[in-house]
Image (tube, grey):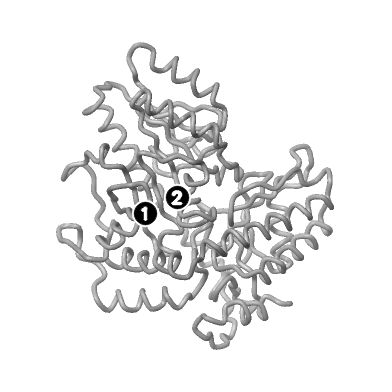
């Protein structure tokens, strides 16, 4: 069954899309005028519907990248089309000098569907994490009396591309040539509680300098590594014992991606602060930093964002949130996630010595290659593209599967067939 047939069957609820004649695009102009900050594949995409996208040559692809875990409802979803249309005709931006109902309504939905009490809105995950870092530092200075606050993060983590968030990111490759980095960060191995406790003992000494522990519930860019329940429960205990703030970066795994609204729900704990972006707006740029009331200590002038929380972005994000709830999309995430993971494990059994394991939660799954082989995640991504499937690496040895949360059983089956074909061609 072709992607074109799948999109017609599995996205029948979408607005009808008239055939579009392919329009050739010369990427030489793009390369001449756009900075080379991305290594782009030789593929120009021009439209999408549901879980399918089309290139300028008219070829269809099943999109299991979804804007890197961002297009929650897929492409051209009627709810988003309607929300975008209605909001742009009503009010799109007036600044945070005034109240807007859309921002308040989105904050209310997020608070009612999480452990948080307050929300701050911005434009991206990096900005949300910046806000969390600033909030933790102010709390450390003004509440705990810490002179030089330290935030502990994990090796192989990823928290953003700003100067503070690449410092928080425990991957030297993202930090190279951007020094001097921000002070006040320390890294520990992920899912290693003994290493964390040792670090806290050394860093704290008699001065209690550890202000916060900042972790991803599941490391996305770091190789689709789920957090260990025992590890995170012990972190929560340590934070409670010492007054340390627990920050969870939910930028990639929040908004239903794991089969729960939030990644922390898979771990049996609650953070003091958590961040969201990516899937929150379904592809419309928005970020949020949420916290519990005891650490809601920002005052006017402490932090701000010109575009953050504008009625356009929050209005569309609210529509995405309401659709997740109204259409019970989390049920689909759990069912399709189980189907995808079981299918990938079946493929892994057919390629011993090539595929080491499959790991993940819900609709964020990683196909992990054996470390000693020459095959890389990029090799598989390219082979899958030739079969009409878009995937994204999560490091050199992990292929990430993050489709829209509305993906159908038929689409998952089609992708699994394509992956097996791709593996046979290159393994």
Q: CA distance from mark 2 to mark 1?
A: 8 Å
Query: On the rendered structure, is 45 left or right of 326?
Result: right
Residue at 56% from the left image edge and 71% from the top image edge = 45
Residue 366: give x, y in percent of width and height: 65, 49
Residue that carries the numbered disc 1 in the rendered image: 287
Point out the tag, 2 or 1, that comes first from the N-terminus: 2
Q: Which disc, if any, is residue 41? A: none
Residue that carries the numbered disc 2 in the rendered image: 251
Decide: is 256 above or below 214. Answer: below
Residue 263: give x, y in percent of width and height: 49, 48
Residue 405: give x, y in percent of width and height: 54, 64
Asked which secondary structure carries label 2, the reply is loop
Query: On the rendered structure, is 394 left or right of 317?
Result: right
Residue 126: give x, y in percent of width and height: 40, 47
Q: Is disc 1 surrounded by few (<14), some (14 to 19) or many (20+) residues within 10 Å?
A: many
Quadrant of the frame with the N terminus: bottom right
Locate residue 321: give its quadrant. bottom left
Query: On the rendered structure, is 300 left or right of 267?
Result: left
Locate residue 56: give its quadrant. bottom right
Query: On the rendered structure, is 298 left or right of 178?
Result: left
Front residue of this view, candidates 134 and 54: 134
Asked which secondary structure carries label 1, the reply is strand
Front residue of this view, candidates 161 and 246: 246
Locate residue 342: give its quadrant. bottom right
**What is the count of numbered marks?**
2
Q: Is disc 2 surrounded by few (<14), some (14 to 19) or many (20+) residues within 10 Å?
A: many
Residue at 33% from the left image edge and 26% from the top image edge = 243
Decide: is 373 above or below 400. Answer: above
Front residue of this view, candidates 416 and 164: 416
Mark 2 in CB contact with mark 1 (< 8 angstroms): yes
Residue at 41% from the left image edge and 73% from the top image edge = 80
């Amino acid at each position: 069954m072709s992607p074109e047939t799948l999109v017609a069957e599995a996205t029948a609820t979408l607005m009808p899309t008239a055939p579009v004649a392919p329009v050739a695009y010369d990427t030489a102009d793009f390369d001449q005028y756009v900075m080379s900050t991305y290594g782009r594949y030789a593929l120009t995409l021009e439209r999408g519907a549901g879980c399918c996208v089309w290139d300028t040559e008219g070829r269809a692809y099943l999109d299991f990248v979804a804007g890197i875990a961002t297009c929650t409802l897929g492409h051209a979803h009627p709810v988003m089309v309607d929300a975008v249309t209605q909001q742009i005709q009503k009010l799109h931006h007036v600044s945070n000098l005034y109240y807007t109902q859309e921002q308040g309504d989105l904050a209310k939905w997020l608070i009612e569907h999480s452990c948080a009490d307050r929300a701050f809105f911005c434009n991206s995950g990096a900005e949300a994490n910046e806000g969390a870092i600033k909030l933790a530092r102010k709390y450390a200075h003004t509440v705990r009396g810490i002179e030089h606050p330290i935030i502990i993060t994990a090796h192989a983590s990823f928290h953003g591309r700003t100067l503070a968030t690449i410092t928080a990111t425990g991957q030297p490759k993202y930090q190279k040539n951007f020094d001097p980095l921000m002070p006040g960060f320390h890294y520990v191995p992920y899912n290693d509680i003994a290493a964390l406790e040792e670090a806290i003992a050394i860093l704290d000494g008699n001065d209690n300098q550890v202000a916060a522990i900042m972790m991803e519930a599941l490391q996305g860019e770091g190789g689709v590594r789920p957090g260990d329940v025992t590890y995170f429960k012990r972190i929560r205990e340590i934070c409670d014992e010492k007054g340390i703030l627990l920050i969870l970066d939910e930028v990639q795994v929040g908004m239903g991606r794991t089969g729960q609204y939030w990644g922390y729900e898979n771990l049996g704990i609650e953070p003091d602060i958590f961040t969201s972006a990516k899937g929150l707006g379904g592809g419309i740029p928005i970020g949020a930093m949420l916290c519990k009331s005891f650490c809601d200590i920002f005052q006017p002038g402490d932090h701000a964002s010109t575009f953050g929380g504008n009625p356009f972005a929050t209005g569309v994000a609210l529509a995405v949130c309401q659709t997740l709830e109204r259409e019970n999309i989390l049920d689909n995430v759990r069912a399709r996630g189980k189907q995808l993971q079981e299918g990938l494990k079946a493929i892994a059994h057919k390629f011993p010595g090539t595929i080491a394991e499959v790991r993940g939660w819900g609709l964020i799954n990683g196909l992990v290659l054996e470390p000693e082989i020459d095959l890389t995640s990029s090799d598989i991504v390219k082979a899958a593209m030739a079969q009409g499937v878009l995937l994204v690496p999560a490091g050199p040895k992990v292929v990430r599967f993050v489709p829209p949360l509305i993906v159908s059983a038929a689409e998952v089956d089609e992708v699994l067939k394509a992956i097996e074909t791709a593996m046979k061609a290159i393994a």
